[in-house]
Image (spheres, rainbow, N blue to C red):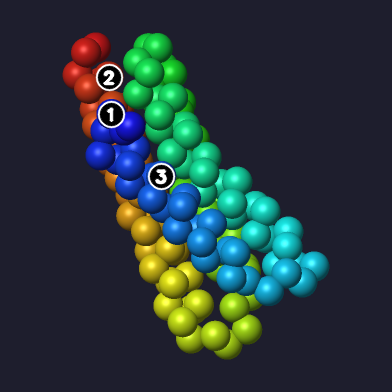
């Protein structure tokens, strides 16, 4: 199903975010933040899959930047959702924030490598 291990990791991240959000209380604030984190967590992998379509170096760079941005957005909205002093949910949220941060760092490293190869081509 996945062409690259990072695609699978992004997919698993989005799945785990969805499992986490299904357990959250649906008050007005949480409802909006849950919608946002669900979208952004899925978009991390969707854009990375698009990046791997190899349409061209410009598209690869753009899609990788969007994946990085969506990982950062996921971190933001995960921080905003309220777990109401539920220690188990707090542990899961911290794991998800950490995973989003790791994905962000991976995409940043990929972008640096792309930038370095572009500057070496000149």
Q: Which residue is mark 2?
A: 118
Distance from Cα at disc 3 to Cα at disc 2 = 29 Å
Q: Which residue is mark 3?
A: 11
Residue depth check, mark 1 versus mark 2: number of the one nearer the observer = 1
Q: Position of residue 23 (x, y in %)?
A: 59, 70
User: Residue 73 versus residue 12: which sits nearer the camera?
Assistant: 12
| N-term-proximal mark, 3 vs 2 | 3
- In the picture shown, does residue 64 fall above or below 90? above
Q: Quadrant of the C terminus?
A: top left
Judged from the image, the secondary structure of the residue bearing numbered disc 3 is helix
- In the picture shown, does residue 117 fall above or below 67? above
Q: Position of residue 11 (x, y in %)?
A: 41, 44
Q: Residues within 10 Å of mark 3 (few under 14, many from 20)?
A: some
Q: Quadrant of the N terminus?
A: top left
Residue shown at 80% from the left, 67% from the top: 28
User: Can the viewer see residue 1 in this picture?
Assistant: yes
Q: Which residue is mark 1?
A: 3
Labels 3 and 2 touching (C-beta < 8 A): no
Q: Residues within 10 Å of mark 2 (few under 14, many from 20)?
A: few
| N-term-proximal mark, 1 vs 2 | 1
């Amino acid at each position: 199903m996945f062409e690259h291990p990072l695609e699978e990791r992004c997919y698993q991240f989005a799945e785990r975010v969805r499992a986490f959000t299904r357990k959250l209380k649906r008050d007005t604030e949480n409802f909006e933040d849950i919608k946002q984190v669900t979208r952004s967590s899925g978009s991390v992998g969707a854009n990375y899959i698009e990046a791997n379509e190899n349409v061209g170096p410009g598209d690869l760079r753009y899609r990788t930047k969007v994946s990085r941005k969506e990982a950062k957005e996921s971190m933001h909205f995960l921080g905003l959702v309220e777990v109401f002093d539920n220690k188990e949910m707090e542990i899961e949220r911290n794991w998800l924030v950490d995973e989003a941060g790791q994905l962000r760092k991976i995409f940043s490293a990929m972008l640096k490598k792309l930038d370095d190869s572009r500057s070496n081509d000149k």
